[in-house]
Image: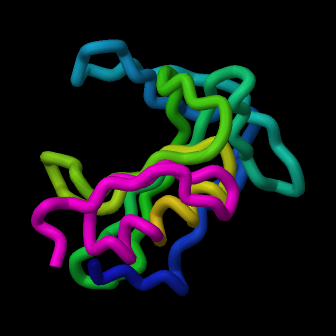
Amino acid sequence: MNVAWESVEFRIPAGGVRARVIGVRPDSLVTAALVDEPPIRDGEALADPSRDLLKIAVIERHMASGAVGKAFVRGMGLREGALASSVAHDHHNLIVVGADDASMMTAARRVSALHGGMVVACGQRVVAEVRSRWAA
């Protein structure tokens, strides 16, 4: 794991009232292109787990570029906490989905500390983890 942690944050500046959302479809790799109105506070678009509107981020983990792609996702069903994984067949970067930024950071940092794998976190607490069998 080669992550520029000083560049990683999950804040999504509000660019208006509406936002594009990735719609996850059960048992499918195909997603839907949705639009929703995330809550906005202090110029920041927020997740709303009560409406199944979560944040998703892909953190570049190979060259410590600091690149982080951020968006919203619906269809995960997560009510609190976050899920992070370095197992992503098309890019093997570090991907994290969460209801809040603190949980997302905890999960992502723990995957990095494991040198790969999957982590579930709630706030600053790691709830479950699986180390990748290819981890160093």
Residue 112 position in % (x across, y down): 37, 73
Question: How many numbered circles does the render carry?
Answer: 0
* Residue 11 visible at all: no
* Quarter holding residue 49: top right
Colour scheme of the rendered structure: rainbow
Rendered position, 41 above or below 8: above
> Image check: 117 left or right of 102?
left
For the record, the magenta segment spans 110-136
Residue at 14 percent of width and 48 percent of height: 90
Q: Is residue 67 above or below residue 25?
A: below
Counting from the top left corner in percent of width and height, residue 107 is at 50, 59
Residue situated in front as seen by the camera: 127 or 115: 127
Could you tell me residue 103's position as x and y percent?
62, 56
**Residue drawn where x is 66% and y is 30% of the image:** 79
Q: How far across and how far down the image is residue 91, in percent? A: 18, 55
Q: Is residue 25 magenta?
A: no
Q: Decide if residue 28 is on the left or right side of residue 52.
A: left
Q: Residue at x 27, y 61 (%)?
A: 131
Magenta span has 113?
Answer: yes
Residue toward you, 130 or 28: 130
